[in-house]
Amino acid sequence: MLGPLGDIVVLDLSRALAGPHAAQMLGDLGAWVIKVEHPDGGDESRGWGPPFVGPDHEISTYFLAANRNKQSIALDLKSAEGKVVIERLVRQSDVLVENFRPGVLDRLGFSVERLHELNPRLVVLSITGFGHDGPEGGRPGYDQIAQGEAGLMSLTGPSPEEPYRVGASIADLLAGIHGAYGVAAALYEREHTGKGRVVRTSLLAAVTGVHSYHGTAWTVGGQVSRAAGNHHASITPYGSFRCADGMLQIAAANDGQWRKVAGLLGIDPDTPRYRTNRDRRAHRDELVAEMEKALAAHDRAHWLAELGAAGVPAGAIRSIDEVYTWEQTRSQGLVVEVDHPVLGRVELPGPPLRFDGLPAREHTAPPMLGQDGETVLAWLEERER
């Protein structure tokens, strides 16, 4: 397979979203990903929907989102036969991905010590809800729980009294992203040391790790950020604004951009209330009202054209279907076609990275449960010889 990780084998023991997303990212980079699923139903996300598609409406589009470029083998990790195959796979793999609760893999007989006894070069990615230690390290964690516990919901929504979850499963996805880049670093390190190591992250760590300026507002400034709707906490004007036929977004991140916006809307940029970002932030509600009064004179298309010509960052608020039919999205490889064994030729969201100099690769469809068992076992036998 094409990609920087084309000689890497990933053993994916994870399920649901965070671990599978990390393994999918490694697969997008060329790794050969072997997904291990329980024979009775497989990955739990195979049952998450709607929508379900296929002739019998048995295929979850949720599962399709996190499992491209993988092969599936069905094994019961609690059975003697399953454990033997896992041991064989561990010996031949470069990376193992798991997102069990702390202690589960140990009880199955695959502690970190045992894994590295089987394969000292193995890189282990372990993702949990709240961390592997600490007073609450053993808690189970799903995305929305982590969004709340890690403070993200307190920053999201129209006001502090109405906390909202982020529409996507962002805690899971961020944990997968952090995990994948941790694996890449550990593989690089292994080139120098000859030894694998354990990479740990959690849903809590992933969300806390992207607090950014909200974090330092508290740790350094002593200020607790709160939900402020569709306007930036620190930059003004930067948010969503009503015009004649709906909403558009304007992001004036510096005084030069602000002066261009003010000129288009007939607002004096040197008014003391609006001269600097600090002034504008202090009078944000007043400025938003004044801007929307001017924006009401024309529709969104007019203002987007005017703002674009002036070099001001601005944009529409697209629905999901609009995003995937937008030519810019498709030009970036963010939609890929795959041949699914039941659905036929379908489109999936594509990987967010591109590498210059590499030809476009053929992605493979998320597998049906256990469809590649014979292939994986034949590969194992060949490697062991």
Image: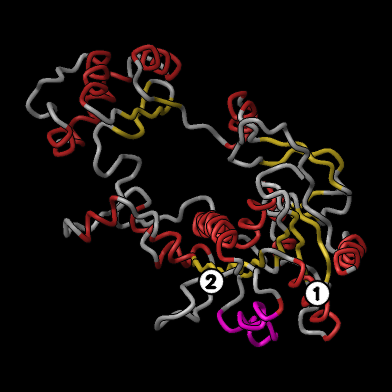
- Residue beneath label 2, please? 128
Element under disc 2: strand
Whichever of labels 2 and 1 marks the residue nearer the N terminus, that label is 1
* Residue 383 lies in the magenta stretch: no
Identify the residue shown where x is 39% and y is 25%. Answer: 314
Is 295 left or right of 68, judged from the image as shown?
left
Q: Is residue 14 left or right of residue 304?
A: right
Image x and y of residue 54, in percent = 84, 49
The amino acid pointed to by label 1 is: Arg
Of circles 2 and 1, the one toward us is 1
Q: Which mark is residue 363?
A: none
Secondary structure found at label 1: helix
Q: Quadrant of residue 81?
A: bottom right
Q: Nearer the viewer, residue 370 or 12?
A: 12
Which x, y percent locates residue 126? 57, 70
Give the dominant element type of the magenta stretch: helix, strand or loop.
helix
Q: Quadrant of the C terminus?
A: bottom right
How many marks the image carries: the answer is 2
Name the quadrant containing residue 354.
top right
Q: CA distance from mark 2 to mark 1?
A: 25 Å
Image quarter of residue 147: bottom left
Residue shown at 53%/51% (left/top)? 168
What residue sits right under mark 1 in the picture? 88
159 vs 107: above or below: above
Tell me which segment is drawn in magenta.
102-117
